[in-house]
Amino acid sequence: MKLKFTILALSATMLSSAYAQQFWKTNGTTGTWTGANWGTSAAGPFTTSYSSNSAVQFTADSTVTFASSSIGNITVADGKTVTISQAGTLSTNGAVRTFDVGTGSTLTWTGQSWSTVAGVGFIKNGAGTWNIGAQSNSLNATNGGFTLNAGTVIVSGNNSFGGSSSALTINGGTIQSSGTRTFANAITIGGNFTNSGTGNATFSGSVALGASTRTITNESSGNRIYSNVISGASGAGLTFNGSGSGITFLSGANTYSGATTIQAGTVALGLNGTIANSTSIVVGNAGSSGAILDTTAKTGFTVSSTQTLSGIGTVNVGGSNTLTISGQHSPGNAGTSGGVGTQAVTGSLSYGANSIFNWDLNENSITTGFDKVTATGTIGANATSAVFNVVLGTGVTQNAAFWTVPGSKKIWSLATIFGQALTSTFSSVTVTNATPELAALGGFTINGTNLTWTAVPEPSSALAGLLLGAGLLRRRRSA
């Protein structure tokens, strides 16, 4: 029994040592990682050397010179600045290590050479900043990858996330990139994140969205380019936001099927870039500002028969090119009841065969309260099968005299709705959300100039007399 107890006690001691936690000295003086600068608590004393694979705690502002070591997880307390000068090789004993940088803290550890042993990988946690800089080498082809969960990582080299063989998982946080960079990592996006920094950064690996719609916020002054295929489970989409002056480019033949929503900023399609499987394209929605879809790299852009274009932003196809609607066009504030607004097109606009223009009307008015479209080029519609669909919003009082006075007409100029005369008009008009009572009182018609509501007139006096006479004649014959 004594032997058994001794072995168990020894095993527990060894396990504790393998996962030991060491604290860097707090007096603010510079020291070497492998020197006698460590303690077993934040209070010290700091008189021991670093033990391989121990977890590290920085509880004060610190300046460190690294030396080849195998490290454990690293934690920087809130509000601290830690600078580690690169030297030697950083190892992790073939494991994935977590860097937890607290709120208001910065860990600067740039240019450090990483071990190429299989299994090495890193996780960034905490609201603070880890300045990785430019790494000198890639990770092993069999590695633990790089995961960003929170906070900011500052990267200035192509290998900052471990190189092309290292998977990059983004579950949140901010990627601050400077200079002209290409990150070849395959990317999995598991949460919303932000791009910031300067210079142009290209993400050339494939991108997987998983099962949810993700938001990418661009606060960069440089462009952010996704040159490979972006895919996702059924219904997964992308939302773009941000106030940065940089453009987000989608240059791959993307296959995700959920909505593409641009709330702010410019999203541009490259020459081979497509969002053809995205069922809904929203360019500017309620509360958004400055949203632009730029397709000028192409010779025009088509909204397919399975897609809907909506919003209050701008679609820039280029002054000499044409935006063709083969599906549906719903200008205005997408997703809001009666959310009227104006969508702008830089270039020409054509409503093709079997297309539908969904026009929101949200007031009993012929001058205000309805969707509008503008274009710098011409606007026309397929006269054989393009449909103008009137969508009556909640702001329309359908039993008001505006609609019900017998024989009255209400006329909306197409030149007002579209900002110009149409080169060709719609083939027919339909109505959505009309009550049965309103439908019985009149109907809409459309021609090359106007959209007109005509209320059913009362029978004329002559016709009433004829009807009365016919009634009397029938009674006499039956007598």
Image (cartoon, rainbow, N blue to C red):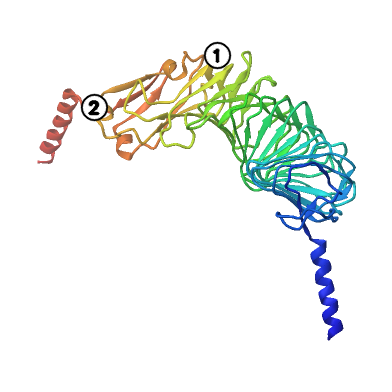
Circles 1 and 2: CB distance less than 8 Å?
Answer: no
Q: Residue at x 34, y 33 (%)?
A: 395
- Taking 31 as reference, is 414 above or below it? above
Is residue 67 in sight in this rendering? yes
Image quarter of residue 277: top right
Residue 350 shown left or right of residue 443 in the figure: right
C-alpha distance separating marks 1 and 2: 40 Å
Closer to us: 202 or 308 = 202
Where does the image place residue 67, in percent across and percent down from the top left? 88, 45
Which residue has dot 1 on it?
376
Is residue 233 in sight in this rendering? no
Q: How many marks are shown on the rendered structure?
A: 2
For the N terminus, give its image quadrant.
bottom right
Q: Secondary structure at mark 2?
A: loop
Where does the image place residue 298, in percent across and percent down from the top left? 69, 21
Q: Residue at x 51, y 21 (%)?
A: 383
- Taking 61 as reference, is 466 above or below it? above
Looking at the image, is mark 1 or mark 2 nearer the viewer? 1
Q: What amino acid type should be assigned to the residue bearing mark 1? A: Thr
For the C terminus, give its image quadrant.
top left
Residue 245 shown left or right of residue 19 in the figure: left
Which residue has dot 2 on it?
406
Q: What amino acid type should be assigned to the residue bearing mark 2? A: Pro
